[in-house]
Image (cartoon, rainbow, N blue to C red):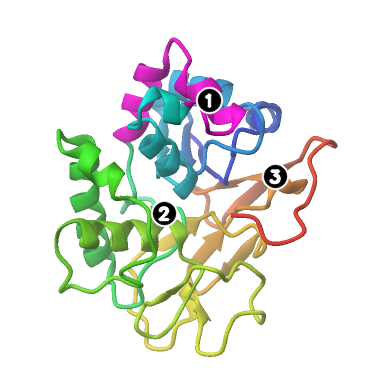
Amino acid sequence: MAVYAIGDVQGCLPELQRLLEKIRFDPAADRLWFCGDLVNRGGQSLDTLRLIHSLRDNCIITLGNHDLSLLAISQRREDAQSRVNAELREVLFADDAPVLIEWLRNQKLLHTDEALGWTMIHAGMAPSWTLRQAQRAALEVERELGGPRHPRLLKNLFGNRPPGWTNRLQGVERHRATINTLTRMRYCDVNGRIDFEGKGTPGTQKPGMYPWFEVPGMRRRETKIVCGHWSALGRFAGLGVYAIDTGCVWGGQLTAMRLDTPEPEYVTVEAEPYRQKPKGGGD
């Protein structure tokens, strides 16, 4: 059995299909971990969701900020849904949208496999979190998102306040801070306050801000971490963190990383030639 983590797909269906062929994915034996942002900007989000949903018994997914945005939009009135971009409209108004949205809503924010020694998130972790604290914070949101009160959470999903996670937070603010940390963080200060604007490569950030995995005094985590979200960072390995968003949707690559080998093994496919790099940083 092989276990592969795959970086941000973002609706890049042909690249995902080529990557699965290249790793010789066998649904009878292999497992896929998706680091989140399955949808948006790649052009084929609906068919990407359909493909991954068809493989759901062999997949583990941690939600990204684009996935959560889709879920939030799905709670709006039909006239509001009709005003979003064409790619997401195709998902929202598909015949199988209720099935796909319900399935997506019940995915994780954090996944740990202690036997493999890996944890998967989409973006980052608060510097004060141990792995156990991160698991508890994620589970609180996962239960809310998968439960009957999910419309309230999704309605209050967006916003940069509070600026970071603390144990004193309660209710929706606590959930939003957890979501922002796990799905939007790149840079933060020593107290975990997020720079929501910083998207560039390390060295371009504001004074007092650090890549989330380099914050002085951050807590030790008991497993290696695989994540996506930060296309400007590209493929990165260091400090127990392995980042694999290699910017497929921006003309880069789609990356799979094998997790069940003594050292991670990378497999990549090039983006379709029509994809273009952004003038600023992507997200």
Q: Residue furthest right?
A: 273
Query: Helix or strand or loop: what does disc 3 sit on?
Result: helix
Task: Examine the rendering and report whether any part of residue 28 can be seen.
Answer: no
Residues at marks 3 and 2 touching, judged by CB atoms closer than 8 Å: no
Q: Look at the image and say whether residue 83 sits in the magenta stretch.
A: yes
User: Magenta-highlighted stretch: main secondary structure?
Assistant: helix
Left or right of 220? Residue 44 is: right
Which residue position holds label 3? 248
What number is the disc on residue 121? 2
Task: For label 2, count other residues whose C-alpha is less than 10 Å away and answer few (under 14), some (14-19) or many (20+).
Answer: many
Q: Earlier in the sequence, mark 3 or mark 1?
A: 1
Tell me the distance, in whole angstroms, between the alpha carbons under discs 3 and 1: 22 Å
Relative to 33, residue 136 above or below: below
Tell me the distance, in whole angstroms, between the alpha carbons under discs 3 and 2: 18 Å
Residue 153 placement (x, y as % from top left):
24, 46
Task: Examine the rendering and report whether any part of residue 250 can be seen.
Answer: yes
Which residue position holds label 1? 89
Q: Amino acid at mark 3?
A: Cys
Q: Look at the image and say whether residue 233 sits in the magenta stretch.
A: no
